[in-house]
Image (cartoon, grey):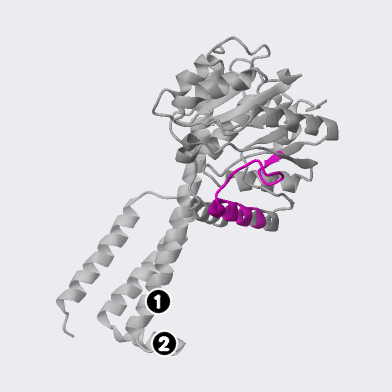
Amino acid sequence: MNDEVWLVVPLYNEARVIGDVVRSARTVFPHVVCVDDGSSDDSAAEAARAGAVVVRHPVNLGQGAALQTGFEFALSVPSMRWVVTFDADGQHQVDDVVAMLDKARAEDLDVVFGSRFLDERTQAGAVKKLVLRLAVAYTNLTTRTRLTDAHNGLRVISRPVLQRIDITQNRMAHASELVAQIGGMGVRYGESPVHILYTDYSRSKGQSVWNAVNILVELILR
Amino acid sequence: MKLVLIQVLLIVVVVAVVARLFRSRGARSQAIRRLGLTLFAAFAVVSILFPSVWNRIAHMVGVGRGTDMVLYALVVAFLSFTVTTYLRFRDLETRYTKLARRLALDEAHAEPGPTGSTPSGPASGGDPGDVLDEPGGRD
């Protein structure tokens, strides 16, 4: 049943961990497409060695652009029914994806967003929590959605919805854009609790809370 | 009327800028912008020769001094320039992204899968748009 699921993994300079991330994901989901966003390290080769399909951006474009490229690749596979957006740095759990897909299939949902705030598993700092809450409030205010965590990288999207998605925000504002586009479609969506593992590695790679300001500017000056 | 050195300098700069703008080839859509620029340049020359023009304008709109008026006009002009430039870069980036994406996807489709683990691999060379019309049913 997981043969119709494709994991889309934006990849940028994660050579240290991407191999393990892809290998552990592929024990459950055989199809993984890594979009190498112009990495300067060995990321693409590591991902390919672990069995992922690698699509390479010739230059660095940003995570939003990488996701859209991954979506378009996935759409070119006729058997694909579901796409999962998955992080390369190992902060997402494959178990959560399984639960999200089960939920989508059982409740006939088109999109399932992961949420860090539906249970207490995720350990985030106070400032990060506050910024994320504000981001959710802003997203709920500006889009026709009601979510508890708008900037979670873990999502399950069905093929019909994927065909209508067009991410134009190349950098970090793509998360809000994605929510806005899905909210505007009037499709059935839901949320599922996920556990984001903030390791020292992912923290060192993760975005600073200052990026909230940049995202806001990118969203306003469209 | 006596020309001060700074006046000569400023006029030369204004004329040089306008000349540079006109040298680049352009379509009809640019004409209006250029006419506006010519007017702007002409006004610049006038205001260099008769700085009191700014005072008169300033008084007309209730600003104390002509220099303040110039400053306000500059702030507005600079801000609109910043925004226009930002938007133009965004537009350019969008096109650049599409080009890079096309390249990336074509390259990925040209190569066989790294593990051959894609049983229903994408049609070689096929445009992803090809499958968009398929009925996207799901379980």
- Measuring from the top left, give residue A36's x and y in whole percent: 49, 27
Name which residue lies at 25% across and 80% down: B49
In the rendered view, does A156 fall on the left or right side of A176? right
Q: Secondary structure at mark 2?
A: loop
B93 vs A87: above or below: below
Q: Amino acid at mark 2?
A: Val
Q: Is residue B39 left or right of residue A107?
A: left
Question: As drawn, is B49 to the left or to the right of B106?
Answer: left
Asked if labels 2 and 1 touch by Cβ distance under 8 angstroms, the answer is: yes
Residue B17 in percent (x, y) is at 29, 61
* Front position in the image: A205 or B5: A205
Looking at the rendered structure, which numbered label has been put on residue B72? 1
Q: CA distance from mark 1 to mark 2?
A: 10 Å
Q: Chain of mark 1?
A: B
Task: Evaluate whether residue A79 shows in this view.
Answer: no
Quarter of the image holding residue B79? bottom left
Q: Which residues are magenta?
A: A113-137
Disc 2 target residue: B63
A193 relative position to B112: left or right: right
Considering depth in this image, is A69 or A125 the residue closer to the camera? A125
Q: Residue at x 41, y 68 (%)?
A: B77
Quick check: is A117 in the magenta stretch? yes
